[in-house]
Image (cartoon, rainbow, N blue to C red):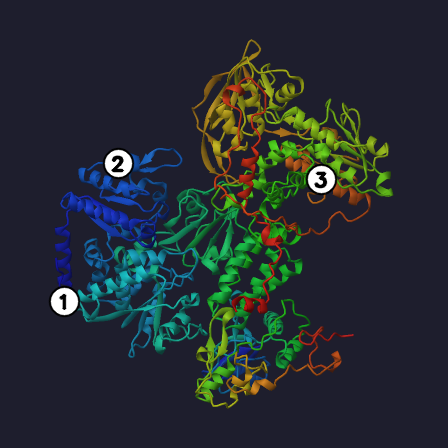
């Protein structure tokens, strides 16, 4: 067993467990988007950052990938952590406003506006679908391609995958509720299931009806009276 | 001479002895550096010619040839070094190579091809005496001269693999690790982790499944190439370092991870690896000691992030290069899960040195926590670019100013950027900073792999941050959301700012975002990605603010705020591109209107303007010659009548009731009166001299600016709204209080700087000694000539040169000499004026300072000077003149004109009392808010030389123009500070299709011949002919078209189809 101090409380966890697992065991809430039990930890969304260490040496690490160490001090919601999460959520809403999961998280963290050029992307590249596909379905049909701002998810050479069994697992795990293949023609896409999706707030007309509290909502542009 | 595989340490020693015995140290060797840089500048041709000459002339026994890697002095390549003498020939061309071969064979030195010291002008023979090499400690780079990279025998002969043998003989891995630990060597890749410690960690890992050593040669920083140079020039030193590492840590396999963009390094490495394997220095049971180690070469696939160690490991494994969480560190779990130690090329190259001289000895180089030497690639705006190896702990100043010899151009060095895209900028005010891992981090930058980019005033820091952010947003692996989106968003914000669309909240957001990206990213790339933004924000926040508030880019780089540089550079915003376009079309009237709208003194400025437009002209800044804009303006103004222009006038009841007092009738005062009049205001100008014109009349001599021209221009400005009262002096005839009492509602002070500053030497009041302004006024206003006999002028500004050129035209003057305390390059006077003065017979003596004035019979008889030499760099980026003791000498003189600078007579405004106007005591100028021209007293504005000290005509006109705007706002009770607007080219002037190809050279401005100039005051510069003017105008690059050209209508798809049908 490894002993560490989390938010002032001493915690004992099995060797090899991550900080996130320790926090979940203790009931400290840590938001995640790219983490899922049963899939390998990845550390892409950076929402689960926590502050470790003391004084000048303290730093933020992603709790889903960082293994618990003996004597480690962890703060799961210090001011620094919250500030970082808010900025990340603001970046996410600015890029991917249609996702209800992201909208809800943003409003929970009191993100009231986003200050960047609005984009309407469909994916935050958390990689859950790719890991689902390769680790659970053993298909390896989809994966990442490109780097930097050209990074995207897709099949090799953007061709229809022969390995895909149209299981829909990728859909099931997606936090952005959007298609995870970059294919523009749904009928030729990996599974085609994405063709029926729509942003969560499209049917609403009034601000108060909506689940999110963004004003104005960047997706539907419905303003609060 | 074949070399056989070696089976024992004794075999190696025998070989080494044999190689040493076979070489004759007395035979001269011609060394030609031919790394990638050398080959690019023509070293291959030199090699070919040297080989041919040696063979054809049968010099094989007399001369040897050695082709090596880069020596570091890239600025002077292709170069040739002759050993063992050390003779250095820079920038050798093909025809000189034969000469050199012949001279070397005869044991001669070719003086005329040697390096010329830019400071003294003398020739320097030996490489070690050249300033660039003198201050370096070249532990690693000096080996490049001794070794042909594709000959292992060369390396062994020069002591190579000696450190490995020493280690193998010790037969104790712990000893080797201790030596490295004692040396204090820190990783040269950037982070500076102690190498010995890393080795120790690796040696303690369980090695049953094998351990890896990796040489990280994925050098991707823009502007850094020292690793390439080491790999190309001396691959065996890196292999030797890795072998020692393998012995010390028990590693079984080594990997070179080399970026694919380094083909020559890969080639040399592969040759070296094969040679080492054939000789038994790699492979199983090396030299019979039981050590087994093999090295493989892996080529990188071109991603910057693969320099990060966890991404590098994945790349070696054949996966996409993406960093992962540390811990576990590579030393615990690396390639294929096996323990792995990754070191940079330079670290490995340091290992043989550490083992050869011993850890303790190595630790003595550099500073306590930063031992050894470090190679920097010094690039950018310095005279000497190249690879520089210095001990840790030297200052940036030493590298930039001593080794690099200071700025390459006239602009001041502003900052250095260290550490590549992950690094930061260090401003020139901090150049005393010692270079080591810790101090650089404290300054907001990093050591990185050692790139050092020097930047001068022509670099825009916003643009620089944008450049690096663009690089990083492309090169981020994209795994971490914060790094991928963060770099993209930072780039967008920087783009907005550099396009003049930024706001204050942009700046806050940028800073906030940068902090979060730094905090939350997983690997070093993301954590350091905001450094370029944060460090420029920290040291150059003002430049960001200039872009945001003033919509200005002082380096004239950011296209989105600069527009056409000529118009942007002009203090009054004259759209030079526009009138040049009209000239090209032959529309001279429109051209004149464009000039006159912006500037009420076009004919004056066409003659005496310092033409900042030409300085910034893109045709000039991009390697060619600037358009002769001033000469074109002269062409237009000479064929136009100032009275023909009818400016747009507005008026209203309010303006008609206001009266404004303007003190001084120079360009600032007249411009203010003119633009106030256009708005309907009435103004009175108070002038202490007998006629209006200020410095235009009294300081600028007629041969530069004919009196008629001034008179005509002033006449066109004066109208019924403007009253001029000459012979009225502020202080004696009027005061600011009396003006307000008389009913003036605002006052503009623009009475110039008419007081020459004094030398502060005894005897300055003797007859024969004149302040320059007094001298010039006496001549220009009254035709009196004060100079006679031998005339000396102290100073280097325009007024000194003007005085000299007036004096040299006088009949009873025997000779005129200008004395200046720095060198000619540093003289503030316009270059063409200095040139003209020298042509007319003025002598120029530089690096002298007056120390005493000699008297004889109550008259000036001479002056005592002391010689100066150039010392350290001062705040202005120029080198300080320092007197050389004991060099005093006396120069007999009949007339001395003191022209060191001018101040204002501001006593009149600062008399004690409640309503005094604030004056800067040190400079004697009036203090104002530069944004609004307001003095501390409400309703009193000031501008021109009285605020800035002696300055140009165009700046004075700009101040007057601005004063009119500010006074208007003040009187109407509007806020004085209003947000600046972007001023980009708007009017489209269609370019003509040139029938003849425009010439590429700048037109020569015609001048009156020397014979006619002597003793006469007719104008020296003449007008261009119409044909010349049109041709010159055709050279314009038309920077405006990017903004003004109407979008071409693309033919519709249907039409296109029809065309093809």
Query: For mark 1, what is the residue?
Result: B7
Give the answer, above or below, for where B470 lies relative to B894: below
Is residue B424 shown left or right of residue B552?
left
The answer to the question of whether label 2 and label 3 lie on touching residues, with beta carbons closer than 8 A, is no
Give the answer, above or below, for where B1018 lies relative to A92: above
Which corner quadrant of the image does residue B233 belong to? bottom left
Q: Are marks 3 and 1 on the same chain?
A: yes
Is residue B15 shown left or right of residue B212?
left
List x then y, in percent, for residue B275. 20, 63
Q: Secondary structure at mark 1?
A: loop
Query: For mark 2, what is the residue?
Result: B110
The disc placed on residue B961 is 3
Is residue B452 shown left or right of residue B540?
left
List x then y, in percent, for residue B1026. 57, 35
Residue B251 shows in this picture: no
Which corner quadrant of the image does residue A9 belong to? bottom right
Quadrant in which the N terminus of chain B is drawn = bottom left
Q: Are marks 1 and 2 on the same chain?
A: yes
The residue drawn where x is 48% and y is 68% is: B476
Is residue B319 shown left or right of residue B480?
left
Q: CA distance from mark 2 to mark 3?
A: 61 Å
């Amino acid at each position: 067993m490894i002993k560490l101090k989390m938010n002032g409380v001493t915690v004992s966890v099995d060797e090899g467990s991550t900080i996130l697992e320790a926090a979940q065991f203790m009931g400290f809430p840590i938001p995640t988007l790219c983490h899922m039990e049963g899939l390998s930890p990845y550390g892409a969304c950076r929402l689960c950052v926590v502050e470790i260490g003391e004084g000048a040496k303290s730093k933020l690490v992603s709790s889903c990938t960082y293994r618990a160490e003996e004597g480690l001090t962890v703060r799961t919601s210090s001011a620094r952590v919250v500030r970082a999460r808010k900025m990340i959520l603001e970046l996410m809403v600015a890029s991917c406003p249609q996702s209800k999961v992201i909208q809800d998280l943003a409003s929970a963290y009191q993100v009231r506006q986003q200050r960047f050029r609005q984009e309407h992307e469909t994916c935050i590249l958390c990689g859950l679908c790719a890991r689902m596909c390769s680790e659970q379905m053993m298909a390896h049909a989809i994966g990442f391609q490109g780097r930097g701002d050209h990074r995207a998810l897709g099949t090799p050479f953007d061709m229809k995958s022969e390995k895909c069994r149209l299981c829909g697992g990728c859909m099931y795990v997606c936090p952005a509720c959007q298609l995870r293949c970059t294919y523009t023609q749904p009928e030729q896409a990996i599974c085609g299931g994405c063709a029926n999706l729509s942003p969560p707030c499209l049917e609403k007309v009034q601000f108060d009806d909506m689940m999110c509290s963004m004003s104005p909502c960047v997706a539907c542009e419905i303003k609060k009276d | 001479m074949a070399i056989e595989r070696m089976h024992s340490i004794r075999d190696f020693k025998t070989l080494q002895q044999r190689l040493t015995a076979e070489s004759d140290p007395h035979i001269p060797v011609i060394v030609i550096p031919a790394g990638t840089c050398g080959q690019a500048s023509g070293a291959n041709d030199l090699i070919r010619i040297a080989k041919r000459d040696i063979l054809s002339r049968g010099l094989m026994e007399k001369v040897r040839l050695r082709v090596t890697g880069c020596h570091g002095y890239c600025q002077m390549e292709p170069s040739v070094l002759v050993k063992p003498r050390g003779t250095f020939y820079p920038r050798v061309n093909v025809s000189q190579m034969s000469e050199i071969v012949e001279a070397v064979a005869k044991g001669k030195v070719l003086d005329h091809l040697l390096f010329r010291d830019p400071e003294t002008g003398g020739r320097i023979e030996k490489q070690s005496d050249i300033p660039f090499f003198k201050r370096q400690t070249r532990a690693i780079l000096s080996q490049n001269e001794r070794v042909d990279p594709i000959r292992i025998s060369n390396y062994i002969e020069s002591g190579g693999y000696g450190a490995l043998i020493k280690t193998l003989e010790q037969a104790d891995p712990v000893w080797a690790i201790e030596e490295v630990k004692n040396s204090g060597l820190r990783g040269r890749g950037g982070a500076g982790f102690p190498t010995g410690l890393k080795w120790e960690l690796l040696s303690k890992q369980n090695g049953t499944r094998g351990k890896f050593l990796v040489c990280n040669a994925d050098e991707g920083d823009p502007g850094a190439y020292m690793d390439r140079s080491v790999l190309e020039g001396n691959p065996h030193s890196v292999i030797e370092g890795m072998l020692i590492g393998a012995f010390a840590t028990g590693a079984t396999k080594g990997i070179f991870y080399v970026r694919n963009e380094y083909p020559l390094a890969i080639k040399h490495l592969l040759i070296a690896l094969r040679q080492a394997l054939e000789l038994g220095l790699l492979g199983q049971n090396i030299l019979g000691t039981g050590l087994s180690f093999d090295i493989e070469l892996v080529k990188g696939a071109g991603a910057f992030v693969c320099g990060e160690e966890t991404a590098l490991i994945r790349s070696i494994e054949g996966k996409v290069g993406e960093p992962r969480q540390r811990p576990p560190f590579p030393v615990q779990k690396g390639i294929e899960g096996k323990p792995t130690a990754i070191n940079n090329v330079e670290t490995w190259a340091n290992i043989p040195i550490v083992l050869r001289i011993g850890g303790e000895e190595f630790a003595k180089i550099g500073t306590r926590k930063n031992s050894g030497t470090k190679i920097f690639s010094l690039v950018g705006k310095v005279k000497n670019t190249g690879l520089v190896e210095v001990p840790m702990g030297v200052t940036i100043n030493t590298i930039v100013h001593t080794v690099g010899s200071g700025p390459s151009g006239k602009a001041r060095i502003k900052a250095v950027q260290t550490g590549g895209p992950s690094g930061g900028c260090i401003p020139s005010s901090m150049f005393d900073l010692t270079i080591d891992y810790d101090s650089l981090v404290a300054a907001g930058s990093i050591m990185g792999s050692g790139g050092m980019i020097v930047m001068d005033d022509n670099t825009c820091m916003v643009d620089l941050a944008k450049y690096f952010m663009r690089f990083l947003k492309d090169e981020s692996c994209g795994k971490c959301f914060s790094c991928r989106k963060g770099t993209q968003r930072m780039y967008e914000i920087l783009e907005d700012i550099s396009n003049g669309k930024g706001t204050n909240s942009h700046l806050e957001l940028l800073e906030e975002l940068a902090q979060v990206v730094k905090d939350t990213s997983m690997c070093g790339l993301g954590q350091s990605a905001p450094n370029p933004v944060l460090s420029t924000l920290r040291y150059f926040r003002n430049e960001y603010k200039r872009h945001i508030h003033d919509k200005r880019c002082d380096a004239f780089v950011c296209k989105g705020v600069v527009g056409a540089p000529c118009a942007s550079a002009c203090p009054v915003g004259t759209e030079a591109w526009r009138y040049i376009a009209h000239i090209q079309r032959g529309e001279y009237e429109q051209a004149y209107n464009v000039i006159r709208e912006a500037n009420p003194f076009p004919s004056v400025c066409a003659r005496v303007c310092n033409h900042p437009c030409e300085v910034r002209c893109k045709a000039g800044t991009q390697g060619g010659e600037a358009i002769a804009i001033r000469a074109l303006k002269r062409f237009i103004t000479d064929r136009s009548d100032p009275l023909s222009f009818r400016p747009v006038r507005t008026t209203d009841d309010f303006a008609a009731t206001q009266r404004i007092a303007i003190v001084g009738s120079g360009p600032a005062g007249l411009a203010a009166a003119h633009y106030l009049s256009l708005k309907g205001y009435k103004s009175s100008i108070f002038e202490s001299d007998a006629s209006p014109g200020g410095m235009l009349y009294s300081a600028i001599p007629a041969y530069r600016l004919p009196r008629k021209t001034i008179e005509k221009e002033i006449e066109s400005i004066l109208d019924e709204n403007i009253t001029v009262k000459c012979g009225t002096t502020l202080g004696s005839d009027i005061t600011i209080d009396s003006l307000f009492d008389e009913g003036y509602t605002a006052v503009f002070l623009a009475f110039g700087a008419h007081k020459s500053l004094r030398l502060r030497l005894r005897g300055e009041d003797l007859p024969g000694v004149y302040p320059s302004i007094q001298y010039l006024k006496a001549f220009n206003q009254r035709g009196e000539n004060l100079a006679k006999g031998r005339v000396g002028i102290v100073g280097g500004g325009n007024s000194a040169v003007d005085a000299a050129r007036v004096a040299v035209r006088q009949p009873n003057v025997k000779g005129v000499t200008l004395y200046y305390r720095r060198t000619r390059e540093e003289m503030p006077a316009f270059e063409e004026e200095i040139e003209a003065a020298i042509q007319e017979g003025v002598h120029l003596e530089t690096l002298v300072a007056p120390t005493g004035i000699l008297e004889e019979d109550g008259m000036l008889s001479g002056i005592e000077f002391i010689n100066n030499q150039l010392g350290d760099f001062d705040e202005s980026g120029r080198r300080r003149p320092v007197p050389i003791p004991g060099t005093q000498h006396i120069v007999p003189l009949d007339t001395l004109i003191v022209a060191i600078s001018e101040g204002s007579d501001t006593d009149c405004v600062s008399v004690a009392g409640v309503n005094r106007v604030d004056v800067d005591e040190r400079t004697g100028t009036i203090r104002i808010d530069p944004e609004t021209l307001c003095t501390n007293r409400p309703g009193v504005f000031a501008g021109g030389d009285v605020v800035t000290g002696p300055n140009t005509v165009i700046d004075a006109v700009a101040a007057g123009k601005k004063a009119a705007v500010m006074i208007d706002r003040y009187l109407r009770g509007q806020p004085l500070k209003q947000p600046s607007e972007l001023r980009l080219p708007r009017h489209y002037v269609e370019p003509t299709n040139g029938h003849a190809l425009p010439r590429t050279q700048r037109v020569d401005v015609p001048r009156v011949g020397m014979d006619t100039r002597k003793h006469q005051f007719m104008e020296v510069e003449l007008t261009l002919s119409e044909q010349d003017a049109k041709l010159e105008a055709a050279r314009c690059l038309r920077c405006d078209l990017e903004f003004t050209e109407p979008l071409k209508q693309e033919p519709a798809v249907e039409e296109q189809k029809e065309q093809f049908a």
